[in-house]
Amino acid sequence: MTGVQKKKKQVRNFMRDIKDWVVEKLLFVLDILEGENSNNKSIGQIKESIKKLKNVVIDSMENSSKVFLIGHNNPDFDSIGSCIGLQVLATDLEKDAYIILEDEIKIEPGVKKIKDENRKKFNFIDKKTYQQLKDENSILIMCDVADQQRISIGDSLEGLKEIIIIDHHEETNTTFPTDKKFISTNVSSTCEVITQILNLERIKYPKEVADYLYAGIVLDTKRFKEECTSLTHDTAEKLLDRGASKIHVNNLFRQEIEEYRRINRLVIDGTNIKKYMEDTLMPMDVSFTLNREKPRTIYHLEDFAKAADIMQKMSPELSYALGYIDENTIYISARSSAANDDSKSVDVGKSMKKLGGGGSHQRAAAQIKVKDNKIVDAKKLKIDEKTKDSQEDAIFTVERKLMDLTEEAIQEIELPVLSLTPNSDENIINNNQIPDSHGIGKTLSKLKSKIKIRRSA
């Protein structure tokens, strides 16, 4: 056996010892959790919270003159589907209910199809009509959104009896202050919550409503690949039992050719891959997608979500897609390929929260306001005044900030074993950091001395 082969064997033995120690600790934790039946317990808590929400929503509707429903700007299937589901509930309670949806050119093709097919049936109104109809006994329910800056009537919320929020994104410092809110990242989508409410109340709803609710769940789970629990699958099954058509839903997801071209041009021409921690045992590729040739191009909000999703099908562990959704707003869509419970992966929700947004471990987003090509809130982003006053387009400043946040996040999760690199004589794992139940301390000491001997030779 040559010297190199001996060193390789020593490293393999060392990694095996590390693996054994980690497995032992994980099994220990699982043994504790098994007694509590933690998964069933958490699902039970979600169900109980939705029951309480149902009672709050019904009580508020029954004691109101009118019910107004609204989703976020540039609504998606989860936003519009949850509004339609709640209108069915209000109608069953014999209440006048209206869905506020502006006639915008930036509306998603699938959502526009839903609106055009059901314009009268579901009482779609615009902001002007809302202002004419509302009174002091009206209520507003915000669906799939918690920030008043992300709804078309954000500047017209005064004079309402109360506002209710139902959302599944992480709460941020811009969440609208109301006592009546259901914000839980433990559910896949707002449509999942609304479907649960309808089923609990035994509301009969037509198959097209089941289609729209199902579409919302399919969208936000990426076709049941992410953010799912057993409750999510159970909810989807009940929608199929109610007549939801997979064929119809799939047709709603069909992209128009121009949208397909726009997003793919953005991905192909605008993506840069940055490699982080190349000299460690945990290298990471991160993609940054934006229109570098024409950065001021205005996109649909969902374009960036789809671009980030496309990049996640490639090699990067992290993907960011960013650009302008109006002249004064930069939008960021972030994706992480790791599982929600993977502590050794970057949590994009935390990164986006630092930029005023939020989301889950795998999927998150943020919006940043700019004015005259400068970041409005430089302090929030911790951008110095020199950068703030730069003539460079603000989007490139945001991209550099994302790079810095990513590097910080990777450093936070870097395993102690990563210090075992060719350039780290003094940073080899301290024996005190790892329990010696498997003789790992001795292995490290031997390995450290052998490495030093080899380097001094």
Image (cartoon, rainbow, N blue to C red):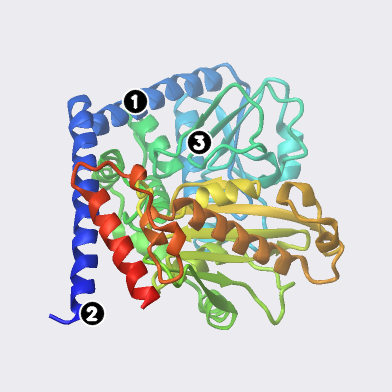
Q: Nearer the viewer, residue 294 or 401?
A: 401
Image quadrant where one finds the N terminus: bottom left
Q: Amino acid at mark 1?
A: Gln
Q: Is residue 301 above or below residue 358?
A: below
- Residue 410 spot, x, y in % from top left: 49, 57
Who comes first in sequence, dot 3 or dot 2?
A: 2
- Residue 238 spot, x, y in % from top left: 26, 41
* In the image: residue 368, left or right of residue 427: right
Regarding residue 377, the answer to whether it shows in the image is no
Report the residue marked by disc 2: 4
Q: Nearer the viewer, residue 414 or 322?
A: 414
Report the residue marked by disc 3: 87
Who comes first in sequence, dot 3 or dot 1?
A: 1
User: Which residue is at 40% across, 27% downward?
Assistant: 50
- Residue 411 spot, x, y in % from top left: 50, 56
As measured in the structure, the alpha-carbon distance from the residue carrying label 3 to the one carrying label 2 is 71 Å
Report the residue marked by disc 1: 45
Give the secondary structure at mark 1: helix
* In the image: residue 335, left or right of residue 228: right
